[in-house]
Image (cartoon, rainbow, N blue to C red):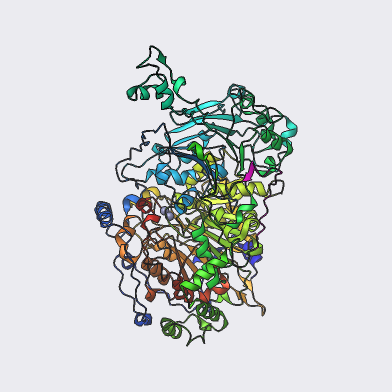
Amino acid sequence: MSQITTLRLLINHSPPIFSPLFFKPRNLHLPIRRFSLLTTFSSLPKKQTNLQSSPAKPLKYKSRYKSSLAEKKKGEEGAKMAETESSGFNKRRAMGKDKDDKPKNLQLKVRKLNPVNTICYVQILGTGMDTQDTSPSVLLFFDKQRFIFNAGEGLQRYCTEHRIKLSKIDHIFLSRVCSETAGGLPGLLLTLAGIGEEGICVNMWGPSNLKQLVAAMKAFIPNAAMVHTHSFGPLHGPDEIAVSDLSKFSGPILLISDEVVKLSAILLQPNEDKESINNESETSIKPRDLSVVYICELPEIQGKFDPERAKALGLRAGPKYRELQQGKSVKSDHRDIMVHPTDVMDPPIPGPIVLLVDCPTASHLQNLLSVDFLNKFYTDFSGNLSENTRAVACVIHLSPSSVASSPAYQNWMKRFGDAQHIMAGHERKNAEIPVLKSSAKIAARLNYLCPRFFPAPGFWSLDTDNISLNSTFSTKDPQTTIAAENLLKFNLRPYANLGLDRSSVPAYTGPAQVLDDLRAEIPEIDNTVQQVRQLWNSPVEVNGEMSLENNNSVVEEPWFDELGLPSCLQDITREDMEIVLLGTGSSQPSKYRNVSSIFINLFSKGSLLFDCGEGTLGQLKRRFGVEGADNAVRNLRCIWISHIHADHHTGLARILALRRDLLKGVPHEPLLVVGPGQLMRFLNAYQKLEELDMQFLDCRHTTQASWDAFASSLNSDQGSSSPTNFGINVDSTLFIKGSPMQSYWKRPSSPVGNAASMERLSHLGKVLQDAGLETLISFPVVHCPQAFGIVLKAGDRINNVGEVIPGWKVVYSGDTRPCQELIEASHGATVLIHEATFEDALMDEAVARNHSTTKEAIEVGEAAGVYRIILTHFSQRYPKIPVFEDAHMHNTCIGFDMMSINMADLPVLPRILPHLRLLFRTEMGVDEADDLLPEAVSAAS
Ligand SMILES: [Zn+2]
Ligand SMILES: [Zn+2]
């Protein structure tokens, strides 16, 4: 049966198609074991496999945590365990009562300011500078205060990489409010809220639409984390038309004025004239979108006290010297005169002024050019300062190059005389040095070892060392205008150092250097590369050169037996499907692992995303390059989100916003987002801020029962309802009537609740059909309210001798305890992607947090008779490679960020693992406690 026919049947509700979870595997000789829920949940018996005799030793890892912390955790876990069912899941957490601790009283930090700052600078935090997925941030640094301007996706990860302490940030300012400038806020707020006993929150500042972002984030962030939100500018009515006159805000709005800085904002709004708006068709900026110019003024520096002059005026050295320096006049000791501060001190030096300019469109530019308040910073047309002009030391331009390179903008820049201009809009120049060097280094090493599973990254790869270094921005005056670079500073204090400071800018080290280092560190690496290549050449015969542990397993493994190969892999091409792991860490992005996202690449048939944690777009760009990622986003068919924890969905808005921009002017349908109900609340609220061009479908409406109901409603003439047995008759006590779980997981009696859902399910059916897929089914798992797993199954295909080849079946667990639903759904799957947050020794923690251990994940896969298991969602306590036992890994592989698993390579998959481990041989025991805050592991994930 061809795929098209199959799908048409699906739309036409042919009953047999609706039980794909129980499709009978043809030619699939995998043992389907009887599975008892109890054995999964209680301590599991040692598996009796031939591999037990493998000489491989379990890995030993040095604990990265101090004992005091371990003890503290033990105590906490004890309390949590009291809430835990003996059956092995945390009921409280599963019912949504995660915050079982007393509510935190999130505090703003109180700092004693140092009016005589010794060090002060502005610095470019090049978040997204290489990948161009987000706007860079700017740090304004004082001895005792830190300000950050813009918080795009990946800011947290960036700060971890560059050892910038998030807990020291006092204020975050947004130059605009959209996914590009604020995508990192939710993750940042959650992390700050999780720091220490009480948690901390931060002041947030932005134009009035910041309110809409905050309203949206309430769907998953505690209010307390956002109480210090300050928005300014015109209020918007429900129809988003400004209800107060913007002209009232034409002057500067004073935001902060203390001993160390005066910070004010000027709002820019695009000119409303029709012509200029129409010309903005290529941008995503709405006419009423506000952007902000921030003006930071440092207080003037007192002139130097001259003791000689004081002496000459008859003063004795002593307390009067200090009084004069404090601005008081004193009586001379030896003469009958008053001595004034100006008599004995040099004239004060004006404090440096820094401007941050975000002018997103040409239409905003018209507004910028007419702002009166800026007149006092302009020189005359010959470039001279007039008497009343206040010289600006540095202007940081966040405006995109398309605007900043226009003649009008360039002329405007000249009006600042000798000011240093730093162009921080996206610059191609910055692609040469990866902003996240640590993960880029690992990606390059993995690529060298095994290019099949780790294809050359989108940039900074061993293959493409010749990236164009030309900046898209060119200037005739390089003295005062430069392109921003990651960590470039402009010093403001001490005054003697005023000016650019490149000392922190990372030096260029190319991928070739990574390779040299790798060879020096692991001399046998080239030999291993050869062995890895052999895996594809002659998978069965490989011996001799393989390591000992593999010699044993090669003989025993049934997977290379022709009969053992799942029939769906027969004659499979490399253009059928590939699973790209974009993020394999839990909780929050870390140096080496970003948070959850799986890219299902169907090649010419488009792609899907399972989960979409913060930074997913950046990861796509790292994998496919800037243009490749744009294509991937353009060709997305559907995004599926497992549950509402921030590590699974906060990258969604950025992807949707980019897709909207890429498809502007191209006929297209809104993108289907399938997710838990709470996500819809967030998206609906968020769309008041920024149009996302999406259509939401609740996971509860994509269950097997929903598909069945949908089919029978289409078939109502016959009055028959398709039989459904998915998940209902399962011998599980978790979801039965009257159980605690039932209270939030209301099994829908009418699974497709309303006409809109029905229509969207129909849309989904069509989307699947176009992508050559047969089914996409969500099923409930045990983690938090409305947590789901997913089954994706390809349509059948016909091979070259006319036989029907069944489609592959991929199952993703989302976050979960091992559960019967998941096992049922995974029956006969080609691939099960299963979370394995904790190592086996941390069973208690896995239960308390409703996650799985490595061994449990593998047990689920084996119970369901799946062909290959891919483990992911590792606790960030395992920064590079998690703890696992070789003996269990015979059909399993550990996931790494950017790992790309082509269906055609599945047979080889488990055998790559021992080789991968070689890369981490010298690094596994390294104590990297400072890479990660202990709090990181406790955030909801
Ligand atoms: Zn998670
Ligand atoms: Zn979670």
The residue shown at (46%, 74%) is 522
When asked about the image quadrant of residue 820, the answer is bottom left
Q: Position of residue 596 (x, y in %)?
A: 48, 56
Closest to the observer: 620 or 754?
Answer: 620
Task: Note whether 292 is above or below 677 in the view shown.
Answer: above
Quadrant in which the N terminus is drawn? bottom right
Foreground: 452 or 687? 452
Residue reaching furthest top? 336
Q: Is residue 826 left or right of residue 710?
A: left
Q: Position of residue 850 (x, y in %)?
A: 36, 56
Q: Is the magenta stretch mostly helix, strand or loop?
A: loop
Q: Where is residue 289 in the image (x, y as percent from the top left)?
A: 61, 34
Q: How many labels does the image show?
A: 0
Q: Is residue 642 above or below residue 492?
A: below
What's drawn in magenta, residue-wise?
466-483
Residue 470 colored magenta?
yes
Q: Can residue 69 be seen in this view?
A: yes
Residue sitting at the far right: 275
Q: Nearer the viewer, residue 462 or 317?
A: 317
740 in magenta: no
Q: Tell me if residue 294 comes above or below residue 794 in the rendering.
A: above
Taking the image as drawn, is residue 149 in sight?
no
Tell me: 314 left or right of 351. left
Q: Is residue 329 above or below residue 941?
A: above
Residue 428 coordinates in the image, percent (x, y): 64, 52
